[in-house]
Amino acid sequence: MEAAQVRKEEAVNRHLRFSCLAQSLLQRAPAVASTSEKFAFAEGASTFGQRGRAIGREVFHSFLSVAKRLFADGFSCEQVAEVLMPA
């Protein structure tokens, strides 16, 4: 938290919410790693990095699914961008 250089109260609140959400997802997410990501020290347990990558893939898949649905509903690129990243 200390490393985040936010200047406004709204930004601090947003950063805190995202940090809590990220921590929740990391704790709850089951991660299935590929064999190339396994190391001897892990002994069958997924590492923090593997869990993070699995969550990242899941979030990106959801992000693309929303964009796909919006485009299928006839939204323009500008409208989709506003929905996904409001100003």
Image (cartoon, rainbow, N blue to C red):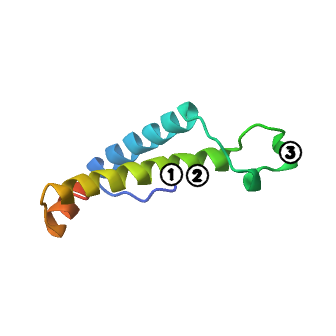
For the point 57% across and 33% down, which residue is it? 27
Contact check, label 2 and label 1, Cβ < 8 Å: yes
Q: Is residue 6 left or right of residue 56?
A: left
For the point 25% across and 59% down, which residue is it? 85
Q: Is residue 40 left or right of residue 36?
A: right
Is residue 1 at least partly visible in the picture? no
- Would you call the spot at circle 2 few (<14 residues within 10 Å), some (14-19), or many (20 or more)? some
For the point 13% across and 61% down, which residue is it? 75
Q: Amino acid at mark 3?
A: Phe
Residue 72 placement: quadrant? bottom left
Q: Which residue is mark 1?
A: 56
For the point 55% across and 38% down, which residue is it? 26
Cα gap from disc 3 to disc 1, whole angstroms: 23 Å
Q: Which residue is mark 3?
A: 41
Q: Position of residue 9 (x, y in %)?
A: 29, 48
Q: Position of residue 17 (x, y in %)?
A: 38, 40
Q: Nearer the viewer, residue 58 or 5?
A: 58
